Amino acid sequence: MLKQWIPLLGATAVCAFMSAPQAAKAEQLTLCWAAWDPANALVELSKDFTTKTGIDMKFEFVPWTSYADRFLNELNSRGKLCDLIIGDSQWVGGAAENGHYVKLNDFFAKEGISMDDFVPATVVGYSEWPKNTPNYWALPAMGDVVGWTYRKDWFERPEIQKEFKAKYGWDLAAPKTYDQLKQIAEFFQKREIDGKTVYGASIYTERGSEGITMGVTNVLYDWGFMYENPKKPYDMQGYVNSPDAVKGLEFYKALYDCCTPPGASNVYMVESADAFKSGQVAMQMNFAFTWPGLYKDEKVGGDRIGFFPNPAEKYHFAQLGGQGISVVSYSDKRDAALQYIKWFAQPDVQAKWWQLGGYSCLKAVVDAPDFKTSQPYAPAFLESMAIVKDFWAEPSYAELLQAMQKRVHDYVIAGKGTAKEALDGLEKDWTEIFEEDGKI
Amino acid sequence: MTISNHSLADKAAEAAARATPERLVGRVRALSDRAIAWLFIAPTIVLLLAINIFPLFWAIYLSFTNYRANRPNAEVKHVGLGNYSRVLNDPDIWASMQTTAHFVFWTIVLQTVIGFTLAYLIDRKFRGHAFWTTLILIPMMLSPAVVGNFWRFLYEPQIGLFAYAISFLTGIPTSEIQMLGSVNLAPWAIIIVDTWMWTPYVMLICLAGLRSIPDYIYEAAEVDRASNWRQFWSITVPMALPFIMLAVLFRGIENFKMFDMVNLLTGGGPGSTTEVASITLKRDAFEAWATGRSSAFAIVLFVAVFGLANIYVKALNRVKQR
């Protein structure tokens, strides 16, 4: 009997011996994020982490349209798929209160990572919950903001400039105000350029996820829309639906009606970038993450593209995008995940992150003297990041978002009711949600 | 060849019998026929309970709570009939039910009329009718995801073939033909796609009905000098009616819960113009995470479909008994 067992034990021992070095080295972290250009840059960047630590990196990237559905489901079901997650800025409240993310304060203190080293808006937007308190749930990873690109080559054509000046009395250039933006958009709408009909502007109109909300808030902030009474949290009457906010929403609808390409009733990041890349539009509203790719584009990039931050009206703001990187509390590899965050926070890694196409939030990178000249879109990015404002990051953010998606899409795209009715309805919806949450 | 196949099968059965352990053979022999029957259907019953019955009862339970799937740590409170009251008093839900009713009504009308007409024509057995039947059936063989995507491109105002064809026929510029972006046209855009895809299915059922009518009835009618028109209304329609009603039932149930095509074509937009009940339910359940409320809505929908289908089946039985 023993004779039968000896070869088996021997084989097992050999297998165990041979696999031992791999087992020690085979630690693998899974990082979850959206499938987009910066994710590819992160794959490239993370190779350095693997080289340095021997920890393999595996990536789960999901298209934006199902990004929230997929990963919020994963977190809510306490799944172990993701060790690290680059979650959207608005998730932080829910993720913190529901215990999905590991609180990073002690880790930051131990490793000497200071949030003062990061752009303040990104710390508030991506890391803190409750907002404006030193409770950190993420490290700012990917700065992003809604801005605009324009066809510099069209703007610079003498015949176009001449005609524009004759019509509007000012030199055609990147707009500084919304009146200017609309005039430019009207000017280009249905214009023949190089034998092709082009249109004024591509703006966010998507209904399914968060598209139209990101576009509308991006404009409404400048007109005076506020989420709540600054002195009394969750008091929204007269702030969400203030006369200025109503005017802002009317402007957004007017811009959609007058100056967008035909069939642009469900446009978000990808569709907007496509409209610009295919030479359909003179201007495009989009998150800054699209800029490196557009700048490299053979047809519309290089000298043909220009970048500008959101125009100003009564105020000057821009919708914050971007995400922080967090450790998922259900992960069995918490130490290795924290090791990744420690590595990612290093200034040289952050500098390389920016070079590869990621938007670093580290002050040492963005405040460097050569940052503004490092990329043609760097000045617009910096200027935009200085004026950011974000959507609710409450645990009930998904319901708050859905209510706004419905109200503004019904008004802007379907032309149902008035802007006042839409915002009054929104204020009512949001009040009900906060009442259910017990916050009012 | 058949003989050798049989002998091979016998040999395989013998080999399987030899390989079966004696103890197992003994145990199986000791079982009654009823026990063996239960043994065979048990896996199906377990599966049915696990993936159909349990979720149904779980959803009923959740519909009486304030449970939210995105807040697993929150306290779950019983809210009685609160969710049902909210669902039944929500104007948005009623609006989505109206959109659903509009969609179901028009798709059924169009599919029944066109499907029956096609079946009637195909039943004439003209030259090449088999080829045309196959060709007509192609749309229903496609995946709704594929259909939704390519119709989205067809409807595209700037590059879409549909817009081009309408422009060619009417002279309206393609850029003004916005099927999916227009409040008035978007519901019809979806109805057109569903009709294109599922009319062949209705046609197939109607064709089965028409072919089940014995020839001698028509021969007798001809002897009585009944006109074609009279034969159609007195023989064809009444005898094919149970089949037509069956097709209406299948399409009605299917379209009442229509999701994929609407989601792909318009996502419920523009605004909420094409937001059918299933889209509202999905948004409530998986985007707003109102699990309790959406469970109540799902139960309301289930009861509505189940109730209507039952009434309809009774009517169908009455027609069949005539």
Image (cartoon, helix red, strand yellow):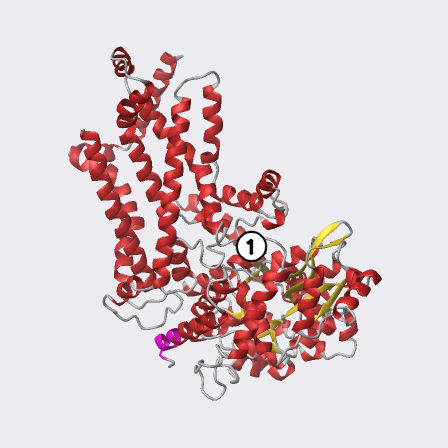
Residue A122: tell me if it is visible: no
- Taken as a whole, is the magenta stretch helix, strand or loop? helix
Tell me which chain the residue with mark 1 is part of: A
Q: What are the residue bounds of the magenta stretch?
A: A432-438
Q: Quadrant of residue B243?
A: top left
Residue placed under numbered mark 1 in the picture? A19
x, y percentage for residue A27?
Answer: 56, 62
User: Image height check: is B42 above or below A128?
Assistant: above
At 61% from the left edge and 53% from the top edge, which residue is drawn?
A: A262
At 51% from the left edge and 48% from the top edge, which residue is drawn?
A: A11
Q: Amino acid at mark 1?
A: Ser
The foreground one among B115 and B166 is: B166
Residue lying at the far bottom of the rendered structure: A231
- Please indicate whether residue B315 sits to the left or right of residue A270 in the image: left
Looking at the figure, which quarter contains the C terminus of chain A? bottom left
Residue lying at the far right of the rendered structure: A158
Q: Is residue A433 located in the magenta-colored stretch of the structure?
A: yes
At 49% from the left edge and 44% from the top edge, which residue is drawn?
A: B145
x, y percentage for residue A249?
Answer: 54, 71
x, y percentage for residue B83?
Answer: 28, 65
User: Image height check: is A411 above or below A236?
Assistant: above
Residue B213: tell me if it is visible: yes
The foreground one among A439 and B154 is: B154
Q: Residues within 10 Å of mark 1 (few under 14, many from 20)?
A: few
Q: Is residue A144 located in the magenta-colored stretch of the structure?
A: no
x, y percentage for residue A356?
Answer: 71, 64
- Please indicate whether residue A87 sits to the left or right of residue B22 in the image: right
Looking at the figure, which quarter contains the N terminus of chain A? top left
User: Image height check: is A430 above or below B18?
Assistant: below
